């Protein structure tokens, strides 16, 4: 029988004891909903994340089984020659744009978009005579293949609409937007891990799982755009809150006019100075960063939030939502890694 190698076991035991010591100090105020958290050194497995090829295969399959209800359009190509896909479903007069993965290392907007697309072709097909959708599960195929924020040229595509449009993705999708003229748009992202703030702006012991953001200050927006955005935010917030296991919050009020949804809200000119004569009520969702075991609820909260907004639009209920409810959404607090509550449950299970 082989002798046990205690030189290997002892450091492991010590590490476990140290982890217990640290967590017992911090355990008076556990963070809800708790771990797992991704440490800066942690290698996150990407096995549970769809590759661009898998996204493409799913889109082609959905088109094939949709009996003509879905059209998969190739609207351009990336620097590395990947197709830029936009799925079109529905025939109704209310038009909505949903996009994911403009930042290639923020994956689950693709999974959520594909889930929403699947619902629209099945359980929600009854609203396709009221609404038409363009769904872009992967805005940034090259960045997704490289697992990086920017595209092949490392350009942040969410800072590349008006006035730059230097990248092929921006030019292609601008013209799709200008042609489709959506009334509503949602852009799906990931953020780091943040606390949820209380009414005084102090961090609670809750971790926010999901922040809803409007990236242009209201003084630059048509009042109907600002009102519609806030109504959409309230509907999305309430639906995600009802899930019970998510802590939705309001993203800080930023003012970035070069972002895609910002250009849509402002009706900014196109690559050659074109005026589409159109503005879109648009916003973004920021989901907590990726941990393999959080995958299920991260995708679920996006799908539930977006589908609640879709239902409110299709039924007309969105118009009766009080936009002032936006003010009641709790703020996103500090990032977990710089908070004075740190170190807390840096737990990896
Ligand atoms: Zn992002």
Image: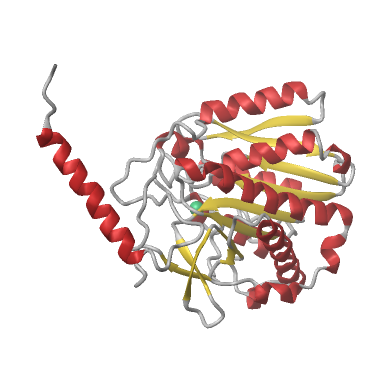
Instruction: Please report the residue visible at 73 percent of the width from the left and 21 percent of the height from the top.
Output: 64
Q: Is residue 241 above or below residue 14?
A: below
In this view, the residue in front, 347 or 106, is: 347
Q: Is residue 33 above or below residue 78?
A: below
Instruction: Please report the residue visible at 31 percent of the width from the left and 51 percent of the height from the top.
Output: 40
In this view, the residue in front, 162 or 19, is: 19
In the rendered image, which quarter contains the C terminus? Answer: top left
Instruction: Please report the residue visible at 18 percent of the width from the left and 48 percent of the height from the top.
Output: 14
Residue 84 place in picture, x, y as percent: 58, 35
Residue 305 seen by the camera: yes
Residue 271 seen by the camera: no
Residue at the limit of the structure toward the bottom, as seen here = 200
Q: Is residue 225 above or below residue 74?
A: below
In this view, the residue in front, 285 or 4, is: 4
Residue 220 place in picture, x, y as percent: 64, 74
Instruction: Please report the residue visible at 72 percent of the width from the left and 73 percent of the height from the top.
Output: 325
Residue 290 place in picture, x, y as percent: 46, 46
Q: How many marks?
A: 0
Residue 323 place in picture, x, y as percent: 75, 72
Hey, which quadrant is residue 137 in on the image? Answer: top right
Q: Is residue 154 left or right of residue 111?
A: left
Q: Is residue 229 left or right of residue 21?
A: right
In the rendered image, which quarter contains the N terminus? Answer: top left
Q: Is residue 202 above or below residue 349?
A: below
Residue at the limit of the structure toward the front, as seen here = 1
Report the coloring of the rendering.
Answer: secondary structure
């Amino acid at each position: 029988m082989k002798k046990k190698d205690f030189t290997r076991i002892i450091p492991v035991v010590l590490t476990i004891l140290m982890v217990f010591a640290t967590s017992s100090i911090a355990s008076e105020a556990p963070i809800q909903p708790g771990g797992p958290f991704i440490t800066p050194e942690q290698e996150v497995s990407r096995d549970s994340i769809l590759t661009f090829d898998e996204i493409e295969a799913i889109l082609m399959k959905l088109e094939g089984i949709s009996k003509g209800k879905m059209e998969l359009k190739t609207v351009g190509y990336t620097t590395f020659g990947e197709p830029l896909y936009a799925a079109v479903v529905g025939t109704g007069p209310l038009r909505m744009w949903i996009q994911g993965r403009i930042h290639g290392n923020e994956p689950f907007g693709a999974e959520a978009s594909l889930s929403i697309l699947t619902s629209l072709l099945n359980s929600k097909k009854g609203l396709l005579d009221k609404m038409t959708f363009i769904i872009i599960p992967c805005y940034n195929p090259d960045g997704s293949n490289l697992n990086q924020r920017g595209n092949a040229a490392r350009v942040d595509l969410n800072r590349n609409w008006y006035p730059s449009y230097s990248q092929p993705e921006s030019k292609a999708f601008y013209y799709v937007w200008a042609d489709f003229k959506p009334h509503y748009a949602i852009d799906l992202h990931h953020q780091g891990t943040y606390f949820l703030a209380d009414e005084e702006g102090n961090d609670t012991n809750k971790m926010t799982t999901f922040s809803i953001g409007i990236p242009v200050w209201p003084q630059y927006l048509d009042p109907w755009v600002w009102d519609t955005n806030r109504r959409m935010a309230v509907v999305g917030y309430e639906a995600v809150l009802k899930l019970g296991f998510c802590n939705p919050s309001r993203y800080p009020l930023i003012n970035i006019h070069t972002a895609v949804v910002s250009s849509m809200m402002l009706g900014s000119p196109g690559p050659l100075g074109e005026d589409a004569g159109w503005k879109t009520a648009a916003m973004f969702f920021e989901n907590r960063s990726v941990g393999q075991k959080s995958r299920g609820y991260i995708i679920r909260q996006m799908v539930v939030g977006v589908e609640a907004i879709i239902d409110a639009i299709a039924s007309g209920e969105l118009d009766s939502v009080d936009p002032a409810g936006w003010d009641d959404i709790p703020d996103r607090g500090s990032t977990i890694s710089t908070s004075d509550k740190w170190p807390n449950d840096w737990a990896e299970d």
